[in-house]
Image (spheres, rainbow, N blue to C red):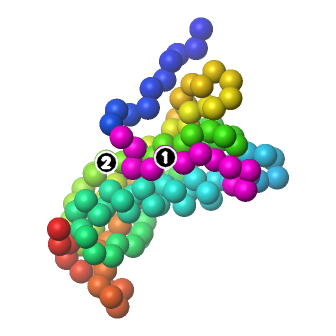
Amino acid sequence: MSETLSPPSGDPAIRVVMLPRDTNAAGTIFGGVILSHLDLAAAIEAHKHHQGMVVTVAMDEVEFKEPVHVGDLVSFFTETVKVGRTSVRTRVCVWAQRRFGDGGHIPVTEAQVTMVAVDPEGNPTPLAE
């Protein structure tokens, strides 16, 4: 019997139903679609620490553990790892709930993303809540 997995507790920063427009030639969801939502989830978390503009400066290695399918409900859970003078490092855990089949939750990927606060000219600026 397989182990029952549960996503992190709490509300995800983002939840998205994957659609046919998000697929690759193999019929699964493009990794780039997942990365785009992952980046947005990190920005949402960073905005808890800075109300101005933030940009992505780094994303650590991303390894996809399972494919995501059309109809899956994908949740992006975030937590702040470190707050610096101009940056916020966020951990994003991505889970998919299978909409067809058993409806189980599976871990898809995770990453740590560093966002930097910038001024209107794009220069790093101290965080301001």
How many numbered tags mark residues here? Answer: 2
Give the percent coordinates (x, y) of residue 77.
40, 44
Residue at 17%, 72% (x, y): give it: 128
Q: Tell which of 100 and 34 is nearer to you.
A: 100
12 in magenta: yes
Dot 2 corresponds to which residue? Answer: 79
Choose top left, top right, bottom left or bottom right for residue 67: top right
Q: Residues within 10 Å of mark 1 (few under 14, many from 20)?
A: some
Residue at disc 1, secondary structure: strand
Q: Tell which of 122 and 52 is nearer to you.
A: 52
Residue furthest top as drawn: 1
Q: Quadrant of the N terminus?
A: top right
Dot 1 corresponds to which residue? Answer: 15
Q: Is 56 situated left or right of 129 in this image?
A: right
Q: Which portion, as a residue range, is magenta?
A: 11-22
* Badge 1 amino acid: Arg
Q: Earlier in the sequence, mark 2 or mark 1?
A: 1
